[in-house]
Image (cartoon, grey):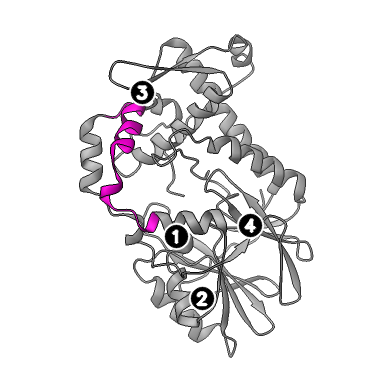
Amino acid sequence: MIYPHSEVPAPGAVIEVAPGVHWLRMPLPMALDHINLYLLEDDDGWWIIDTGIALGDTEKLWQQIFDEVLGDKPVKAVLCTHMHPDHCGVAGWLCDTWKVPLYMTMGEYLTARSFSKMTVDDLTWTTEQYYRGAGMDADYLDNMKKNFGGFGSVVKPLPGAYRRLEDSDYLTIGGVRWRIIVGAGHSPEHACLYSAALNLLISGDQVIPRITSNVSVSPMEPEGNPLRQWLASHQHFLEQLPSDALVLPAHNTPFYGLHDRLRYLVQHHEDHLLALEEACQQQPSSAKELLPVLFKRELDANTIGMALGECVAHLNYLTRRGQLRRDTDANGCYRYVSVDETLDQRLRMSGHEPDEAPMMV
């Protein structure tokens, strides 16, 4: 992994990382304290790639960018790689301010619209069933309801219309053709942008250095299999993109070493899967009981839900692959048992190190 930039953009400022491609940052109120955003210069205006969260100084810093960076060109479009609040939080405000279109994949746009309408009343018996199945008690759900903030509290209302991005679409911006490459797993239909002319990938959260993106099952789709989509997406990127592309991620700093990073991420999750199989060989276990297999550090109220979702994602993947059996106990809790006769042989060829904790990305 090579990181060509020793400096990061100051608040309200940009760094040009390639002709017409500008890197900026917005603050985040969490352990991961920033998001990288990008401006693409067109002949008659600017494209904003991702937006920041609708909290703190985000709008103020955008206004500083408008005043000091854009020159005499307006914003002409906003593109969100995916629906998480740090990526689309002020998309509605930006689009309304400049009266410009929003570009997203359909899965991301519709999911964001759906989530923005959620209230505590949507945490019904299906939510309770999900957490009971994962091994959580009634107090956990009660506390979650009491502290429910909702997606809409950190995302401005999205525009009522959007322009759909699809895999293998092209956008021409400033004479440069950008190919849309769609991944999944971290979110439903995550859009990345690749320019062959610049050999540059704007990767959002689909590929980031140093930390791994959260891949979770949520109560909305309790039988989902996002890890299968995540691993398949990485294979797709390995086949479609050159190894020497400069990657502009949503967190940390731009880097070279795309293929090495993709292979590491695949192996990282394969190690987690094998460690879960080993733990379930020793005794039938719930998702809650298996959290220490994946995470070293004690989990707090801010991280346990995300950690649980990631653990369930791995367990659903193994169950669908026929390597775990899922039984239900008298309390409605799922307990997982290893059933693959090749496990002992595979364990002899592996090593596993749990993560510190899930990152909120």
> Disc 1 marks which residue?
86
> Disc 2 marks which residue?
13
Identify the secondary structure beneath mark 2. loop
Amino acid under disc 4: Cys
> Disc 3 marks which residue?
289
Residue contact between numbered discs 1 and 4, judged by CB atoms under 8 Å: no
Q: Position of residue 337 (x, y in %)?
A: 46, 14
Is 189 or 340 nearer to us in this picture?
189
Kindly report which numbered mark, 1 or 2, lies closer to the viewer in this rendering: 1
Amino acid under disc 3: Glu
Q: Disc 1 and disc 2: Cα gap in Å?
A: 18 Å
Q: Main secondary structure of the magenta part?
A: helix
Q: Residue 331, located in which quarter of the rendered image?
A: top left
Q: Please say whether residue 124 is one of the residues in the magenta stretch.
A: yes
> Disc 4 marks which residue?
192
Q: Position of residue 266 (x, y in %)?
A: 62, 36
Among numbered discs 2 and 4, the one appearing first in the sequence: 2
Q: Position of residue 88 (x, y in %)?
A: 47, 63
Give the class, few, some or many, for how many residues have Cα within 10 Å of label 4's Cα (few <14, many ≥20). Answer: many
Report the side of 134 relative to 259 (left or right). left
Relative height, residue 355 to residue 282 (above, below): below
Amino acid under disc 1: Asp
